Amino acid sequence: MNRSDRFEIDWSSLERYRPLFFWLVPAILVIGLLYTSFYTVQAESQGVVLRFGRYVKTVDPGLRFKMPFGIDHVSHVPVRRQLKQEFGFGTPGATNETQVSTEPEQERSMVTGDLNTATVEWIIQYRVREPQLFLFKVRDPGLTLRDLSESVMRTVVGDRTVDEVITIGRQEIEADALTQLQELVNRYELGLSIDQVQLKNVNPPKKVQPSFNEVNQAQQQREQMINIANGEYNKEVPRARGEAEQKIQAAEGYALKRVNEATGDVSRFNAVLKEYLDAREVTKQRIYIETMSEVIPQLGRKIIIDDKANQILPLLQLSTGSEGNSR
Amino acid sequence: MKRLSVGSAIAVAVVLGFLFLTSTYTVSETDQVIITQFGKPVGDPVQSSGLHFKVPFIQEVTRFEKRILEWDGRPNEMPTKDKTYIVVDTFGRWRIQDAKQYFLRLRDERSAQSRLDDILGSETRNAIAKHELIELIRTTKDRVPVRDETIADAPGNIGVLYPINKGRARIEEEIFTKAASKLADFGIELLDIRFKRINYNESVRQRIYDRMISEREQIAERFRSEGAGEAAKIIGRKEKDLLQIESEAYKEVQQIRGAADAEAANIYATAYNQSEDAVEFYSFIKTMETYQEMLDQNSTMILSTDSDIFKYLKQIDQEP
């Protein structure tokens, strides 16, 4: 009896809430209707509307209306956002789930066209161009893009030598990979457009790196040896050129001197000759006497003998004796 | 009476609603549907998306993907024709083309994936075993590699692409053609199969590294030897240039001096030879000059009074 008492519902007391119930049900319905029929498309996105699963339209950003209660379903696709995928390495904290590689070690190791190996890290940047294709054409487009990108990069690297891959061919590889990847993406109808393929670190394998460095060093050494030799050349040859020039100049000076002196001598001679021709004897005498007057006083000893004296020795002895006495 | 009619109206509505729900189904853009009746497929697969009707209760809906699906092969170690062991990782893309066939033969995607593993795996293995490694690596037959100028004439095979007959793309195509026909029986359309990764296995890799190292060492040695050679050339040129410069200078000096001497001699000769008198006079004054230079305080001179200078020493008037 107690039990039934507890569960006895007093219908008459509920009777006064009746208007409330009357309004509550439609109110919930209206709120549900409003809640499920309005939606916002963010500025960077487009909304793809499906009705009973069938594609109806693609809408631009803003507040939009759709059929309520799950009749219409909207998928948001970030068409204006640039997306990125990294290969061979991973930047932590990526929002895009296919951005970072799961097995970087295997991804970056590649065989080149001369059967060497290189480690290649790269990124691709892309955006969704056609949301409809992106959503409906391929299951897991992000993963498909990763597979394609790896395949394309290996195809391109496989056609190149290790030197091209590591140093001189980088830009060409980027450009080639971009065209090939875009082509494949179009064929797969992924609805993506590839903006950029960018090589990051490209290196020879770790074990081989020291020998690649050695090549660079040897290259430097070669330049250095050549520079040192050139230095020696430049130290000596220009100086020798200068010295040669000096000798030649000196010789030219000598030549000038020689000719000038000759000309001088000759004009002096000519002048004197003229005098001589005018007065032969006198001039000759004068010159003779002038010369003698200069020469004789300078002589250490002068012995004058008469041609009739037939001995000169005693006189000489006298002269030395007197000199010895005076000392 | 009124209460009864409201109650029955609700009951009718519920029944109708239930009927509606069990006799309709939606097909998404990404799906295709097969209707089965007691487990057996009825009619053609439904491809078009949207709202569809079926017989309630007895017909059931089985959904399949309409999109392109992935197949990701496991990395496998296998030998090429030239007995190089490589690790090959392939991927493919496929879709369910004949959903009825697919449903009958495979039922679900799990068994489809395992069938793909079998067929694509063995076709890949066959293709790899029939080709040399380089055929799997390269694609473009006639590509001429850009060569690093600094190692342009390096010895051996550095900077050279090995020649190929078919290339990667053709081999992928061969695998594709063979596998595609086998998979068609399962209602599967193979769209593509590609090598994702081809790498040397661990032991081969060590050999490759050793080869790369020795190649690079060759290049390094070459650079050093080139440097020494170039330096020797420059030193040689230096020596040659020095000798040339010095000897040319000597030659020119001698020529200049010689010419000057000749000219001077000519000037003198012309002047002194102009007449008999000039010759005589020249010899006279030259003798006089020579006396001046020749005689100094160390000389002793014995002069006779017969000499011209002292002739007046004895007497003033001379007999002519």
Image: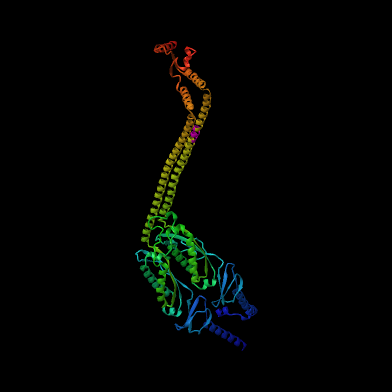
Toward the front, the furthest residue is: B320
Magenta region's main secondary structure?
A: helix
Report if residue A89 is visible in the image: no
Which percent across, then down, holds residue B226?
Answer: 40, 50
- Of residues B32 and A222, which is closer to you in this image? A222
Toward the bottom, the furthest residue is: B1
Above or below, B40 relative to A323: below
Q: Is residue A122 left or right of residue B13?
A: left
Which percent across, then down, holds residue A38?
Answer: 61, 73
Which percent across, then down, holds residue B232?
Answer: 40, 46
Q: Where on the picture, by quarter, is residue A34? A: bottom right
Above or below, A212 relative to B197: above
- Of residues A134 and A322, which is closer to you in this image? A322
Instruction: Give the magenta-colored segment's residue range.
Output: A252-258
The quadrant in which the N terminus of chain B is found is bottom right
- Of residues B104 and B295, which is closer to you in this image? B295
The question of residue A153 being in magenta is answered with no
Which percent across, then down, holds residue A85?
Answer: 50, 64
Above or below, A154 relative to B184: above
Q: Is residue B16 left or right of residue B187?
A: right
